[in-house]
Image: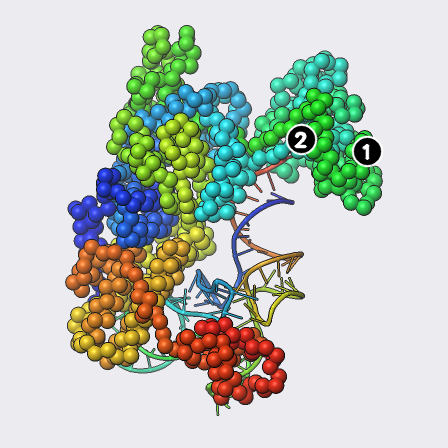
Amino acid sequence: MDYNAREIEKKWQKIWKNNNTFKLNDKDVKKPYYVLEMFFYPSGDLHMGHVRNYTIGDVVARYKKLNGFDVLHPTGADAFGLPAENAAIKNGIPPDKWTKDNIASMYEQLARLGISYDWDRTVETCNEDYYKFTQWMFLQLYNHGLAYKKKSHVNWCPSCETVLANEQVVSGSCERCKHEVGKKDLEQWFFSITEYAQQLLDDLDELKDWPDKVKTMQANWIGRSEGAEVDFAIDGSDKKLTVYTTRPDTLFGVTYAVIAPEHPLVTELIKDTPQEDECLKFIDDVQFSSEISRTFADTEKLGVWSGRYLINPINNRKIPLYLANYVLMNYGTGVVMAVPAHDQRDFEFAKKYKLPIEIVIQPEGENVDSHTLTKSFEAEGVMCNSGKWNGLPSKQALEEIIDYIEENDIGRRSVNFKLRDWLISRQRYWGAPIPIIYCEKCGIVPVPESDLPVRLPLHVPLKKKGVSPLTDCEDFIHATCPKCGKIGKREVDTMDTFVCSSWYFLRFCDPHNEDLPFSKELADKYMPVDQYIGGVEHAILHLLYARFFTKALKDFGYVSCSEPFKNLLTQGMVLKDGAKMSKSLGNVVSPNDIISKFGSDTARLFVLFAAPPEKDLEWNDSAVEGLYRFINRVWRIAENYLNGEKNDYDTEHDKALNYSLNSTIKKVTNDIERFNFNTAISSIMELVNEIYSYKDKNHNVYNKNIMDNVLDKLTIMLVPFIPHVAHELRELLSLQGDVQWCRYDEKALELDTIEIVVQINGKMKGKLIVNSDAESEEIKNAVLQDEKFKDLISTSAIKNIIVVPKKIVNIVL
RNA sequence: GCGGUCGUGGUGGAACGGCAGACACGCUAGCUUGAGGGGCUAGUGAGGGAGACCUUGUGCGGGUUCAAAUCCCGCCGACCGCACCA
């Protein structure tokens, strides 16, 4: 008979719920440990990725609790966002209802998995008592000058009918719906994340236990570069254009300049030149071609002469100014000095439009000719054609030239970042309203904190038309100006849901606070999160935004930590047939089906055992069954023992079993600490196998002293992985219910003799049993005198013998 | 192009520089059972041998070392991220 997973799991889940087993009372907390899995989007159904994420977190939470920590382990829902709105449009269910029903269902599924959450701390971002403080966050940023409204050229997803942040555009497509993203000129709200660019970059060094991959991705995204700005006078005008370059050492090699077609000065520059018509047509063409495809590296470089010249300030040379599609307006100054000899893009452009190529850096010990050049030379070298810097290493010249342009006031040292400010307004309904009122007299007026929340009205028609549905909501729009009392209009856009998720980990510290998003005292008690766990897909988006919020809140004085997540574990995906489970591929395995069939302990054990947490995991139906059989195998140990014959004679088998037990405890403890759950579980399996062979060898007679201890420790070790059955077994065996993690007995691990490996020329030739405290000389003699090895070695031929006590002997012939 | 991760049986995966393939799935044979499932026993990298054993083996090629899957260099391949960032 199989063990009754369904009944046991129900029973223990009820006990945990009724006893508030995982509730954390702030005042009792002495040794806090905060473990957090990324909260879920309430799509309605838990998928295997959730099961994996939350099971990993639960192992950590339960293990830390067993080790005496006061574990903060909360859950909640990232509940605003488009799917609710789309479902409403499609099925006529209000977003509010759709979301709340789904949240209830997902909480139920999580409880069914046996995750040890503190259910008194759940947080849902779509609730008034939460988004009130999301709006509060907006006001803090606004009051500190970090939130502003600006007209700009923004990403627009025509399918979602809203603007997107740069981070939400992946390879030119919408991160959510994969639709190609276009551009629009709109007045939008931004958060000044760029103010923190340097700090966000520098502090990555503090995050010792973050995966390098994530840190590198963030560093690349922030994209710091060092160089100089150089002012080029416009020929025949008293105006100038400033370029940004990381290669001031190539300044003498500038043979033309390029400006982005959307640069604000372009219209003025081309006006009344013979090129005006041609330029206007070019600008038109460029804007017609999709702005995103224009920025692909392999797009052909196109340009047209502007009819103007610039003056290179270093040598007063007159160079033509081109408009070109490969210049980005939103990086640097939108104007680039072109050095075809030393930049591949400029090289291609120069070849195409027959512009001069001038070499100013020679590779060490070579003399390259610009006419025979087939591609640009971008490495360091020796300066030439560069006035007084000729002959210097280019690296040194770079510094000296910056000094020179600063001294002569023709430029300055400069740092640039790829990171852009975070566009946070969305033209959608289901989100936190931006707490701003527009007054004809006072202009932009923030809603006073005391008037929060700005409530999201519940019954709003949700037709898509490219503007926020709130635009037509008369009750919502009308507001009195908090400053002058006249009639004003509310901002109708809502906030990006990533704003909501940028501070939720702080709310968990103090979820019922009505006056503040959280008290400083409680935030400082729990923050930073000791262990954060989630998918790598948030490497840039959520994890960067959350870091920004934490730093800003620290500067405002609301928290003491400057980083939100001390350790980060990015778990791999769950695959089936080599591909990510997805509805469109039809390879989805439903957690509910697996739990109904085998129970959640089996589901948990599988996702932990099948692969190390950070790697992708391939779903395997028969492996799942195998783990179900394993749990049954453990179950039968208890049954056999209860029905078996017991005595208290010590046999050699008892000693061996005790040794296995203690080495297993040691290994499992180390493995859990390092998140090697798969190997922790295999060691437990080995112990279970040992128990079976002990039973056979001891002819079904159990030494009570040994076995009671073995079963006590075995069931404790199982608690983090398969908590329901572990607790049930403890009850069955009349073991204590309130448990602590087990320690191993160092003495039990001490052996009289040990096996050492004997190698000849590094190849394993056999083994030898020696006293465990044997020293090198003793071991060496033992090997040389052993019959087995005598034949293989002629003593005279021995060149060297390496002895590593307790491990290995290598005889070099 | 740049950056990162990684290449080990039929499969998932183990191996502080020290016995390669732990543990598991699958498969093969046998026992148990009315059958199926389950349970139990043995085997399972490749090649050779009746056999204890021998040879070989961690993508490929070099190197360091008494000793390399592990460290270093060069290729090849896979996956992920960024991508005209001047």
The answer to whether residue A407 is above or below residue A626 is above
Q: Which image quarter holds the C terminus of chain A?
A: bottom right
Q: Position of residue A174 (x, y in %)?
A: 48, 35
Which residue does the numbered mark 1 point to in the structure image? A385
For disc 2, the chain is A
Q: What amino acid type is highlighted by mark number 1?
A: Asn
Chain identity of mark 1: A
Q: Residue A176: in sight, yes or no?
A: no
For label 2, the residue is A245
Residue A728 position in % (x across, y down): 20, 59
Question: Disc 1 on helix, strand or loop?
Answer: loop
Tell me which residue sits at (40%, 26%) in the image: A556
Q: Where is residue A469 in the image (x, y as percent from the top left)?
A: 37, 23
The residue at the point 80 percent across, 38 percent down is A391
Where is residue A768? Give x, y as percent: 45, 80
Quadrant hosting residue A2: bottom left
**CA neighbours of label 1 inside 10 A, class few (<14), some (14 to 19), many (20+):** some
Pick the front one: A612 or A81: A612
Residue A255 appears in the rendering:
yes
Which of the 4 quarters of the picture holds residue A99? top left
Q: What residue type is labelled 2?
A: Thr
Q: Which residue is drawn at 26% across and 60% down?
A: A716
Residue located at (31% from left, 51% from top): A64
